[in-house]
Image (cartoon, grey):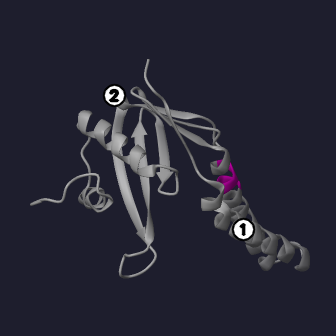
């Protein structure tokens, strides 16, 4: 029987997203109340309400979600779109992206996308013990001989998952 590691997104890590999403949705809905129905501004505010509502729903969903890792694979449960799972033996794509907030690339976040079977699981670095999940997924990707892009390779080096060449 394999040990299951359970990972969650801490509420404190997502609180800013909840506040921003709620404020943006509130502002867009307030604008809907102020403008005449069927005007161009109304439809823009309606579209913004939908976008901000989806953003807020996704963030709240992430608060309830868990990532489970074991010898067999990875599972996402409690998400907005239902449970997803990928067996390590079915892993076909491994992508680690870095999104910089500044030009000097000193601030930003990492996003891991795993694809296998007909499922895609996206995990950002605010997940507790993200590095453990990243290392286990990389181990599985190597075992499955999944090729990665140069950007993913560079991000794995930056995350400390693989050694820098020449060291």
Instruction: Give SS at disc 1.
Output: helix
Check disc 1: other Cα within 10 Å, few if <14, some if 14-19, many if 20+: few
**Other-residue count near label 2 (Cα within 10 Å), few / some / many at <14 / 14–19 / ≥20:** some
Q: Residue visible at 40% across and 51% down?
A: 131
Q: Looking at the image, how many numbered discs can be counted on the residues? A: 2
Residue at the image position 43 percent from the left and 74 percent from the top:
107
Image-based side of 79 in relation to 37, left or right: left
Residue 68 to residue 103: above or below: above
Residue shown at 47% from the left, 42% from the top: 120
Q: Which residues are magenta?
A: 57-61
The answer to if 58 sits in the magenta stretch is yes
Q: Quadrant of the N terminus?
A: top left
Quadrant (top left/top right/bottom left/bottom right) for the C terminus:
bottom left
In contact (CB < 8 Å): disc 2 and disc 1: no
Residue at the spot of label 1: 19
Q: Is residue 103 above or below residue 121?
A: below
Q: Is residue 27 left or right of residue 110?
A: right
Residue lying furthest top = 1
Q: Is residue 48 above or below residue 120?
A: below
Magenta region, main secondary structure: helix
Q: Which is more toward the observer, 113 or 162?
A: 162
Q: Residue at x 70, y 59 (%)?
A: 56
Q: Earlier in the sequence, mark 2 or mark 1?
A: 1
Residue situated furthest bottom in the rendering: 103
Q: Circle 2 — which element?
A: helix
**In the rendered image, which quarter is residue 23 located in?**
bottom right
Which residue was labeled with disc 2?
A: 89
In the image, is residue 7 part of the stretch drawn in magenta?
A: no
- Whole-percent x and y of residue 3? 45, 26
């Amino acid at each position: 029987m394999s040990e299951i590691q359970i990972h969650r997104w801490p509420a404190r890590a997502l609180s800013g997203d909840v506040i921003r999403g709620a404020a943006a949705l509130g502002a867009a809905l307030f604008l809907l109340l102020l403008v005449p129905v069927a005007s161009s501004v109304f439809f823009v505010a309606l579209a913004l309400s939908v976008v901000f509502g989806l953003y807020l729903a996704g963030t709240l969903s992430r608060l309830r979600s868990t990532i489970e890792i074991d010898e067999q694979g990875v599972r996402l449960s409690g998400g907005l779109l239902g449970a997803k799972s990928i067996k390590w033996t079915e892993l076909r794509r491994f992508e680690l992206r870095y999104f910089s907030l500044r030009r000097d690339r000193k601030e930003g976040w990492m996003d891991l996308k795993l694809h296998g079977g007909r499922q895609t699981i996206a995990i950002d670095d605010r997940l507790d013990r993200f590095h453990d999940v990243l290392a286990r997924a990389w181990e599985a990707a190597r075992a499955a001989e999944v090729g990665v892009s140069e950007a993913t390779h560079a991000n794995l080096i930056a995350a400390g998952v693989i050694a820098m060449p020449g060291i």
